[in-house]
Amino acid sequence: MSALVVLGAQWGDEGKGKMTDYLAETADVVVRFQGGNNAGHTVEVGDKQYKLHLIPSGILYDDKLNIIGNGVVLDPKALFEEANYLKGLGVKFTPEKLLISDRAQLIMPYHRVLDGLKEKARGKADIGTTGKGIGPCYTDKAERSGIRVCDLMNKEVFEKKLRRNIEDKNAIIELYGGETLDFDTIYKEYLDYAERMREHVTDISVRIYDDIKNNKKVLFEGAQGSLLDIDYGTYPYVTSSNTIAGGVCTGAGVGPTMITNAVGIAKAYTTRVGKGPFPTELNDETGDWIREKGHEYGVTTGRSRRCGWLDLVILKSTARISGLTSFAVTKIDTLAGLEKIKVCIGYKFEGKVIDYFPASLEDLAKCEPIYEEFDGWDESVAAATSYEELPENAKKYLKRIEEFTDTRVSSVGVGPKRSQTINIAEL
């Protein structure tokens, strides 16, 4: 039995797409368990680059089953746009390659409209939403007024629920000064999606359980990062789902005893998009240098990312909360060429030193990072094909990550391509 969780250990954008694609080579099934098309994964294979938002990264392999779990909020329009994009790159999109949970919540046009209107109404207090309708869809799920994939599969049920929701949502849209939506247009559009999706829809909890019991290797793929978790992230600047390992159980319908390993993907430095405290942020030439060399711009939004030194307090917290069994450290090549490199090993907070991530943003904003300094390494790191070939200073850097977090480093990314991944320890 083998079930591996892959999740972001920081604020997202850690390279989960590449690492999931790499680990999927030895997996049979790849499952996306939370989030929506607000995520962005970039995978490079050979001379081709693939940008994924909703479909699991294992889709690039012809012999892997990919599953969109019930914890995902599914925008059918985005799904088929991405499917057409992948087909144009020669990737197959069939029921044998992709299954969709019948319990997944559907993102509707009114979710996207309300997302934009509410964010605009917040003014300077906006939370940096992508405008994809993710938050409003999860709100309806919690409010128990959402429409699920299984509802879409039943024409009469879907019509009844959609009429009720259009009436309710149009009243709210009018309050915000927006244009109301037409029932007939949405109804017709989504019935078309229903027929295109029907062959892909099933009870994915049953399928995943059977696969694990039959000794298939199942890989659970997370979106965003641990610090964007609705409970343990930098609230309110978070996403609307549980991005930590515990989200697998509710988002894919599997028990915790079936999960055998959890790998946290950690960038060799720290980045963040949007507002909120960022203790190790570099608002200087070094920060700009890292941003440009690392191409730190969002796949989904195109927004530039804030950059800073590696924060080991964050990684230690993530390892604890998700029970990580290892880290996969990515983009160590980006730091090549720096004479000195720093890592944060604690925070000074109200006259004492802490090594955990506080809940209050006001407290976090008061935290002053405590740094250790390392000698840098040269560009030869990008050519390394084994751990032994890494520069000694890069090895010392990785060793310090292991020591501080009490979690081993199982692989290292030295470039964007699938082939530029060094496996250190078997999972």
Image: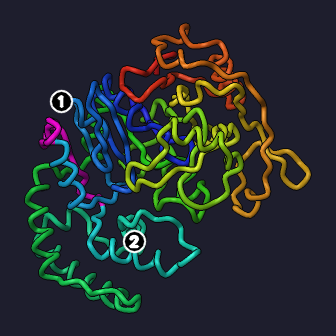
Q: Main secondary structure of the magenta part?
A: loop
Q: Amino acid at mark 1?
A: Asp
Most distant residue in the front direction:
285
Front residue (pair 250, 414): 414
The residue positioned 73% from the left and 45% from the top of the image is 356
Q: What residue is shown with label 2?
A: 136
**Residue at the (80%, 49%) spot, across then down:** 368
Residue 110 location, quadrant: bottom left
**Residue 249: in sight, yes or no?**
no
Residue 319: in magenta span: no
Q: Residue 97 lies in magenta, yes or no?
A: yes
Say whether residue 225 is left or right of residue 220.
right
Quadrant containing the N terminus in the rendered view:
top left
x then y, percent, for residue 6: 44, 36
The amino acid type of the residue labelled 2 equals: Pro
**Where does residue 400 sit, x and y in percent of width and height?**
70, 24
Q: CA distance from mark 2 to mark 1?
A: 35 Å
First to last magenta residue range: 87-104
Q: Residue at x 33, y 29 (%)?
A: 24
Would you name the residue on which mark 1 appears? 62
